[in-house]
Every structure is written in structure tokens, then in C-alpha cells.
Image (tube, rainbow, N blue to C red):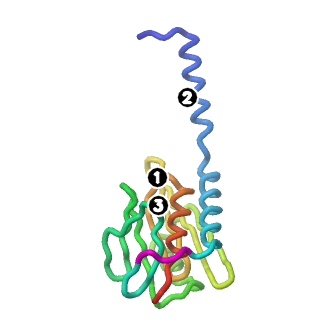
Amino acid sequence: MRLNGWKTSIILTAVLLLAGCSPSFEEEQKKAGEAAEAEMNSKQEKANSGNKEIEYHLPFGVELEKETPSNILLKNGSKTYILFYNPHENAQSRIVYESTLEQQPDWDVKHTFKKEEKFGYLLIKRLEDDAYQVVTGIGGVKVTTETKNLQPDAAIMMNIANSVKVK
């Protein structure tokens, strides 16, 4: 099939406009930071899952896949989240955050949040293929994933982290 000159121009213009409409990394990380902070500041969700050490809330569609000491593997369709918890650290603790930075110091984004008795954070590292490694946490709890959807995943992850209660 051969396209006329004007049809080719319209298609190229549409492609360029669509490419120009996709949000920049700075816009995406800002929205993810706002979503994570809003979840941290929201009311703690009622627990609907747990083990011997903690109880926590899993949003709709997120399911428990596997548990090991201090780690819980969660699935939401093809997406995997890792919930890490240190039951000896409270919601104000910075130890898990600082040890995460020591293990991998080259994060593209390091947001921290404080609210009364909580210290929260969002870490983002760019990966290949427009994907990101994302970590959210509050005190001794952190949730990690790889995603192409920063804002919604940051919100889900912080929602889970915010819901964790040590027994």
C-alpha cells in the first residue's frame, strides 16, 4: 500500500504529537512521590492478611505468593511485589532506608516523607525499556517492584507498607 504525501504527513505529525504527550520522567516521579506521600498520610487500612509477626492489608487483586523470614512475595497479575519487614524497627526508624541506600547508592530519585510518628520514603531507579525499580517504605517496612507505571504502583506499594502492623 502506498500512502500519499499528505497522509504520510498526518501520520508522522500524529506520531510526533503522541510522543511529545508522554510525560517526562520528572513529571512521572513527581506524581509517584505525591501518590506515595498521600498514601503514607492516609488512614491505615484494616489488615486482611498476616503471619506470626505482622498483619497487613492487601489491595484488591494483590495476593500472597510465598513467605520467607522477613520477606513476603506478593503478586498482582504478572506484577510481583516484595514486602520486607524488620519487626524490631518502628515506623520512625531510618535503618531500613539507610541500609537500602548503602546496598544500592545510585538511585535517580530519593524522596523522604515525615508525618508525626512515621518516616516514609520513595526510591526510584531507571532501568532499561522505560522500566523502573521502585521502593517505598515506612520505618522498618519496605515494598519493592519493577514497573513501567510509577504513580499507580507507588500508591499501591505505600498503601501496603502503611498497613503493616507488628504483632
Write down the residue under mark 1.
131
The numbered dot on residue 67 is: none
Residue at left offset 61%, top offset 72%: 40
Q: Nearer the viewer, residue 69 or 19?
A: 69
Q: Position of residue 17 (x, y in %)?
A: 61, 31
Write down the residue under mark 2.
15
Marks 2 and 3, how far apart at CA: 28 Å
Q: Is residue 92 left or right of residue 128?
A: right
Pointer 3 and pointer 1: residues touching (CB < 8 Å)?
A: yes
Q: Is residue 91 magenta?
A: no
| Mark 2 Cα shell of 10 Å, populated few (<14), some (14-19), many (≥20) | few
Q: Position of residue 45 (x, y in %)?
A: 55, 74
Q: Is residue 110 left or right of residue 128?
A: right
Name the quarter where the C terminus is drawn: bottom left
> Which tag, 2 or 3, sits closer to the chain's start?
2
Q: Position of residue 65 (x, y in %)?
A: 32, 68
Write down the residue under mark 3.
133
Q: Is residue 47 magenta?
A: yes
> Which tag, 2 or 1, sits closer to the chain's start?
2
Q: Position of residue 58 (x, y in %)?
A: 45, 69
Residue at left offset 40%, top offset 80%: 50
**Residue bounds of the magenta highlight:** 45-49
| Mark 1 secondary-structure assignment | loop
Amino acid found under the numbered disc labelled 2: Val
Residue at left offset 59%, top offset 29%: 16
Amino acid found under the numbered disc labelled 1: Ala
Which quarter of the figure has residue 36?
bottom right
